[in-house]
Image (cartoon, rainbow, N blue to C red):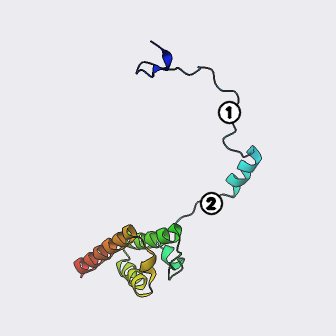
Amino acid sequence: MDDEDGDILNIQLSDTEVDENKADRTGQTEADFQAVKRDYRAKVENGHIHKHIKLPLGPAATKQHVQQVLHAVEELYFFRHFRDALNLIKSLQSDGSHQALDSHACKLILCYERKCIHKLNASS
């Protein structure tokens, strides 16, 4: 059999020696890392994302802006602020922001709208 036939048993094994010329994966010195580590503070969201988003979303809204809106609605629902979530959803619909949302985001927001209405009706 010829090695160039491409048969199923034509397997090449790699060298077992470690490649000594591997590139540095961090690209950061230890001093730089320690400086970042010293100044780093974890971002904790506690129900106030909706206060920091900029509405209305324009037609050039980035995916990050859309994700912030989704996270704001989800966070309000999670913290059981159903009326606030409904108000945010209503403002998205009335100010034209919903036009910047893709179909997946629209479906999620409508799902949260139904859930909030259901929760409010159940608690009444």
Pick the residue in front: 97 or 111: 97
Pick the residue in front: 7 or 42: 7
Q: Viewed as shown, does residue 31 lie left or right of 62? A: right
Element assignment for label 2: loop
Report the residue at 53% width, 70% height from top.
62
Q: Quadrant of residue 21?
A: top right
For the N terminus, the quadrant is: top left
Q: Residues within 10 Å of mark 1 (few under 14, many from 20)?
A: few
Q: Position of residue 110 (x, y in %)?
A: 32, 74
Q: Position of residue 29 (x, y in %)?
A: 75, 45
Q: Residues within 10 Å of mark 2 (few under 14, many from 20)?
A: few
Q: Position of residue 64 (x, y in %)?
A: 52, 67
For the C terminus, the quadrant is: bottom left
The kind of residue on which mark 2 rests is Arg
Residue behind mark 1: 22
Mark 1 and mark 2 lie on one chain; the one further toward the N terminus is 1
Number of the front mark, 1 or 2: 1
In the image, residue 90 above or below residue 63:
below
Q: Viewed as shown, does residue 114 lie left or right of 5? A: left
Q: Residue furthest top?
A: 1
Pick the residue in front: 102 or 55: 102
Q: Position of residue 30 (x, y in %)?
A: 74, 44
Q: Viewed as shown, does residue 77 lie left or right of 68? A: left
The kind of residue on which mark 1 rests is Lys
Q: Quadrant of residue 105?
A: bottom left
Residue behind mark 2: 41
Report the residue at 45% width, 87% height from top.
95
Element assignment for label 1: loop
- Label 1 – label 2 distance at C-alpha: 32 Å
